Structure formats: structure tokens, C-alpha cells
Image (cartoon, helix red, strand yellow):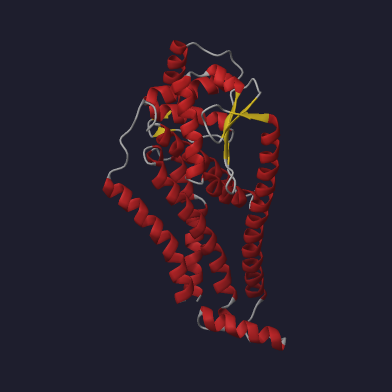
Amino acid sequence: MITAAALLGVIALLLAWPVPLALARAGWPARSPGVALVLWQAIALSGGLSMIGSLLLYGLVPFGADLGAGVSALSGDLRAGTLPVGTSVSHVLALGAAILLGTHLLLNLLATFVRAERQRRRHHTLIALLSDPLHGQPGMRVIDHPAPVAYCLPGAGHSATVLSNGLLRLLDAEQVRAVIAHEQAHLVQQHHLVLLAFKSWHSALPWFPIANRAENAVALLVEMLADDHARRVVDDHTLARAIALTGFALAGFAAPSLGEADATARAAASASLTEKGPVAAPEHAAQQVMPRVARLVNPAVPLRYSATAGALTVSVVLLAGPAFILFAA
């Protein structure tokens, strides 16, 4: 089991820093955000399983030759109040760390979900009181706010898309259609659940730098996925103008004209492009505007089928590999 524990430890280290760092800096995720999102989830799950599994296997070394025998022997020794010969402080610490880490991650995920659900219910109540329905658009609510705001509010059987008066005054009808399609994509594709998982990971390990980077990268990817859905409703330039106009206004500037919005979109695109592609998005949502506009103004060809198959195969291997090592040890 020592070999398996060491192998899982190496995998955990790779998935804790160099692998997600390389993915966050890569340019191809903007071409196929869905594939990149699957890969990010595989990295997070595999990294957590490898880290916990490595500690668990090392701690069980004195108790048995494999995982099943070790767990069974540990249970019997705990009932008897004894420890086998060869058990060291490092083995006890590794077992304790595996149990604490696993419990901490699971409880934090549960707590994050409960808090989010309470906030959503409270928000639904406030929206019902403070907003009006949008004529001819079921499930749409309009709030009286001067800033151009649009967001979706998921819920069990009563989801809503919320727009502000400021947004409706700023955008034309086609641009509003693009925004609505974008927000509805978030609801249909259940993006809030993906974001919730990565938010939980970040809050559970706030000192872990890659957790913050992963949360930001995933947040940008789900925005790009929603943009791709909106592109089926309106053309790319209409969507890019809507994003640029809204981003321009949220930044505190006066609303630009149509020509200025086009210039803003082109400037955002050129400013956010590097030799490797769109730069990684910073934490604030407003900073996600530039890479989103970039891929609309300068559309890139999605990954080829071979590259997509390769990325998905890597995701499957990342998920299955540590589990196989753990249970085959």
C-alpha cells in the first residue's frame, strides 16, 4: 500500500498546482468551454480523492495489506483499544488527516448548499415583492434599478430571470433577447450547481491558491457556455455589443453609442488576446467581459473531434485512475 499511497500523493500534487495552472493559462478552453468545464470538474474530484486516498492508504499500512483488510483491522483494533506493532505517529496523523479532510470537504459542501438555498428562497421572496413581470415574457421579472443588471434565480419549480429597467433602457430589443437567452441557458444547464461545488471547494480551502483560480476559471467557462446558447438566438456581434454596452455602463461610464459599442467590443477583444488566447479572468464578474467579447468578435474554431475525445478521455482517466489505485491497493 505504500507504493499506492505514494502514487496517489504524486497525482494529488500534480492536480493541486501544475495541471490546473496549465489549464487556466491555456487558450483552447475558450474554443470549447464545455469540454474544459468537464476537465476542471475531473481535476477537482480526482485531486480531492487522490489527496484523501494517499493519506488513508499510508495510515492503514500497519493494519493490513490492502484497503479492505486495513479498514477491517482498524475497526477491530479501535474496538479492542489496541494498535498493531509498527504503528507510528505518522500513520495516526495520516489517518486523522484523511478523516478530517474528507469530513471537512463534505460538510462544507453541505453547508454551502444550505446557505445558497436559503439565500435563493429569500431572494425569490424579495423579487416577488419588488419586481414586475415583463410583458409577454413568462418567468421574466423587472426591477426598478438604474444599473444594467441581468441575472437568473434558480429554484425548484419557480426559476426566474431578473432584468433591471436600466438594462431595458440601455439595450435594444435584439440585445435584450440575447441577454434573456444567456440567462435562460444558465437555468436550463444548471450552472449554479457547478459554481456551487467550486465555491464550496474554495471556501473549504481558502489558503489553497489553485481553488480560487479554479473558481474564477469555471465562472468564466459557464458564462461562455451561456453565450454560446445565446448565439443561437442572435448573431455574434449583437451579443458582443450587448456585453460591451453592459460592461461599459457597469464600469461607471456613460452609455456609448452603437458605433462606440462596436469600438469597445473590438478594443476589448484585442486587449484580452495574447499569443496563447484569451487571458484568464480575474475574480470580479465585470472583468469577465473582455475574454467573452474577444471570442465573439474574433470567433475561433471549436476543438476538433480528436482533441475533444482526447480531453474527455483524460477526464475519464482522471476520475477512474485514483479510484482504481485506491481500491486495488
From the viewer's side, name the closer residue of 117 and 43. 117
Q: Residue at x 68, y 45 (%)?
A: 121
Asked whether residue 177 is in view, the answer is yes
Q: Residue at 56%, 22% (x, y): give it.
A: 167
Q: Is residue 312 left or right of residue 210?
A: left
Q: Residue at x 48, y 62 (%)?
A: 10
Farthest right residue in view? 81
Residue for point 45% across, 30% down = 292
Horizontal and vertical percent for residue 295?
39, 30
Question: Which residue occupies the foreground of this view, 224 or 42?
Answer: 224
Write down the quadrant of residue 282 in the picture.
Answer: top right
Label tally: 0
Q: Is residue 269 visible?
A: no
Question: Where's residue 310, x and y in %?
Answer: 32, 52
Q: Is residue 88 left or right of residue 291?
A: right
184 is higher (above) or lower (below) than 252: below
Q: Residue pushed farthest bottom? A: 80
Residue 99: x %, y % from top left: 64, 68
Q: Is residue 242 above or below residue 129?
A: above
